[in-house]
Amino acid sequence: MEKYRLDSDIKVICVTADSFPSGILGAHNTLHSMLPSDNGRNFFGISSPNKKGDIIYKAAVEESFAGEAEKLGCDTFVIKKGEYISIPIHNFISDVLRIGRAFKELIANPRIDPNGVCVEMYTGSDDVRCMVRLDPVKLA
C-alpha cells in the first residue's frame, strides 16, 4: 500500500454498468465506443455502495472539454483531489480478481473518507492503480 496524491479535482464522463461485477466490461466498451478518440485520455472505474448495499460501478474518462458529457448524453462525476491510499497492480488482466482484493484491503483502513469512492485509475493498457481517498479530517 502506498500514498498517492491528486493535486486537482478530475471531472469525468461516466457510463454506469447495468450490474456488478458482470457489467463492468460492457460499461467500458460502451464508453470507448462513444468517444471520437481515446488517445491521451485518462480512464477510470468508480464504485461505491448504494443505500441497499449494492455496488454501483461507473466506467469513466476524463472530460476533454467543458460540456462534453452533456453532448454525449452522459453523467459526470468529480474525482476529488487529495491524499489517497493506493495499490498499483501490474498486468491486472492476468488476474482481474486482484482489483477486488486490493479494494478490500484499502477500505479496511480506518482513515478513509466515509463519503469517498473506490477509484481505479488505468495507467497503461495492463496496469491499474486502485485508490481510496483518505479523510482530510483524519489526516490533520
Image (cartoon, rainbow, N blue to C red):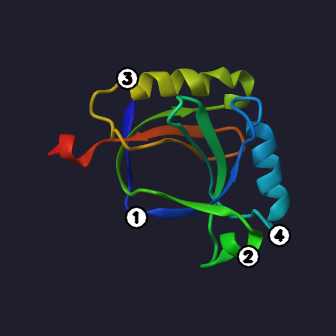
Q: Which residue is drawn at 77% across and 55% down?
A: 31
Query: Which label's residue is closer to the chain start, 1 or 4?
Result: 1
Query: Are discs 2 and 4 less than 8 Å apart at CB?
Result: no
Tag 4 secondary structure: loop
The outermost residue toward the right is 33
Q: In the rendered structure, find residue 36 and report the number of the disc placed on it.
A: 4
Q: Name the residue under label 1.
A: 8
Task: Determine the CA span between mark 3 and mark 4.
Answer: 39 Å
Q: In this view, does 132 lie to the left or right of 96?
A: left
Task: Determine the CA span between mark 3 and mark 1.
Answer: 25 Å
Residue 71: percent from the left, percent from the top?
73, 76
The outermost residue toward the bottom is 66
- The quadrant in which residue 69 appears is bottom right
- Amino acid residing under circle 1: Ser
Q: In the rendered structure, find residue 108 and report the number of the disc placed on it.
A: 3
Height in image: 96 above or below 23? above
Tag 3 secondary structure: loop
The outermost residue toward the front is 52
Tag 1 secondary structure: loop
- Amino acid residing under circle 3: Ala
